[in-house]
Amino acid sequence: MRVNREEEIYGEGERAEYVFKVVSGAVRTCTIDMEGRRQIEGFYLPGDIFGFETDACHRFSAEAMSDAEVVALPRATLERAAADDKATAHALWVLAASELRHTREHMLVLGKKGAAERVVAFLLQMAARAKTDVLHLPMSRTDIADYLGLTIETVSRSFTRLERDRAIALDGARQVIFKDKGRLQALAA
Amino acid sequence: MRVNREEEIYGEGERAEYVFKVVSGAVRTCTIDMEGRRQIEGFYLPGDIFGFETDACHRFSAEAMSDAEVVALPRATLERAAADDKATAHALWVLAASELRHTREHMLVLGKKGAAERVVAFLLQMAARAKTDVLHLPMSRTDIADYLGLTIETVSRSFTRLERDRAIALDGARQVIFKDKGRLQALAA
DNA sequence: CGAACGGTTGAGGCGCATCAACGGACGTGG
DNA sequence: CCACGTCCGTTGATGCGCCTCAACCGTTCG
C-alpha cells in the first residue's frame, strides 16, 4: 500500500480494522483537541508498527510525513492467529509493551519544564534508533513542536542554541550531526 | 498486606515480582528524574490494580498516600494462570489496555498548555470515578502538582479561581463539590 | 505552647508564546 | 532564463503566565 506525503492513512475515531507496518518513509500519529491544538503521539520509521489499538477504534489519526509504503494486516487475522499460536500471542504482547513504554517515556518528556530539555530528549530518542551520529529528521519543525508541546519558534531556537554550544551541528534543517552526546545527556536533565 | 501513610510499597528499579490491588486507602506511582523533579504516573483507589509491568523491573515506585491495605499477587502465578486459561489471559490484556489508555490520556493532559486546563482535566478524571458530585481527594496539593507538571502554588490558585467562578466549591482543601460541570467541560478545552 | 506541616495568598522575574519580518528553497508560468 | 508565489525555517520584539521566593494562616502533634 502506497501513500503520498501528508496523506491520511486512517482517521481518529475510525474502526481499527488493520494494523500497519512501515516499509519505507515515515508516519506520524496524532490527535486534535477541541481548541484545535494538535498533539503528536509518535513517529514511525521503517520496520515500526503502528495503528495497533486495544480498543475497537483508533484514538489517533495516522498520516504519512513523506511518500511512504506500508503494509496493512487485518486485525481479525492477527487475533485469530494469536488465539491459536503462543508465539504470535507473545509477539503481540511485546508489541503492546513497547507501545506502553514509549507512551510513558513521552509522558515523562512532556512533564519536563524546560524547552531545551524536551528538545534534547527528543533528539536522543531519535538518535537511539539510528546508530550513527548523523541523523536525518523526516519530520518538520511543526511536527517536532506538536510532539513536544512547544512552538516551532521555540524548537528552532533550541536547535540553534545547541549548535552554538557545539553539542550538535546542522546541515540544513533536517540533518543533525551529533558532536557531544555527553553534553546532550547532561542537558536532558 | 498493610502499609502506613507515606510508606513505600516498592521502589523504582526493583524486580516486579508482584502485582497489587488496592483494598482500602490510596496509592501513587511516581518516578524521580536526575534533577530531583518528581513525576507522578497515577493515583490508585480501592479496586484498582497497580504494579503491573510489562518489563522485568518496576519503572516507577509506589507509595501509600494514606494508611492502606493492598493484596499482592505473585506475578509468576498470574502468568502461569494466563498460559492455561483464556479468560485470565484476556483479563490481563484488558488490564494492559486500560494502563495504556490511562497513560495516553495523562500524556494529553501534560500536553495542554494552560494550568487551568490541566487542573480541570484532573478534576474531571477524578470525578469520573466517583459517581457523586462530592469528591474527596486522597492526595496532597504537592501530589496533584507533580501529577500535572505544575507547582503547588499554581494548583492552589487554580482551585481558588474555580471556586470564585462557581464551577466548584471547596470544603476544606480536600473536599471538592462540583457545581457546574458544564463550565468545567468548557474550561477543559 | 511551640514546632512542623499543608495550604493559601502576594510580589517579582524569567521563559516561552505570540506577533512580525526576513531569507532561502522550490515550483510555476511568463 | 528570470519574476513570482508559496512553504519552511530562522530571528527579533513584546507580553503574559507560570515559577520562584516569601509571608501568613490553620491544623496537628510533641
Image (tube, coloured by chain):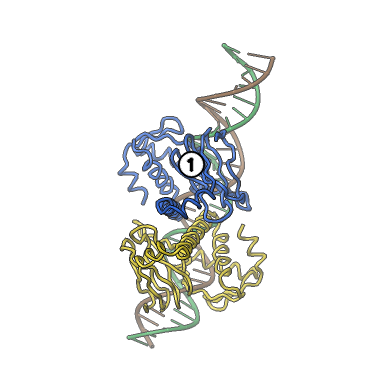
Chain colours: A blue, B yellow, C brown, D green
Q: Position of residue B112 (x, y in %)?
A: 54, 55
Q: Quadrant of residue B69?
A: bottom left
* Closer to us: B51 or C29: B51
In the displayed structure image, the side of residue D17 where residue A49 appears, left or right: left
* Closer to us: A174 or B145: A174
Quadrant the C terminus of chain B occupies:
bottom right
On screen, residue B56 above or below A15: below
Tell me if residue A67 can be seen. yes
Q: Position of residue A37 (x, y in %)?
A: 59, 49
On screen, residue C14 above or below B186: above
Q: Position of residue B59 (x, y in %)?
A: 37, 59
Q: Which residue is mark 1?
A: A21
Answer few, some or many: residues within 10 Å of disc 1's Cα (few below 14, many 20 plus, some between 14 and 19). many
Q: Position of residue B21 (x, y in %)?
A: 43, 72
* Closer to us: A103 or C10: A103
Q: Chain of mark 1?
A: A
* Closer to us: A14 or D13: A14
Q: Amino acid at mark 1?
A: Lys
Quadrant the N terminus of chain B occupies:
bottom left
In the displayed structure image, the side of residue A120 where residue D13 appears, left or right: right
**Residue at 33% in and 48% down:** A186
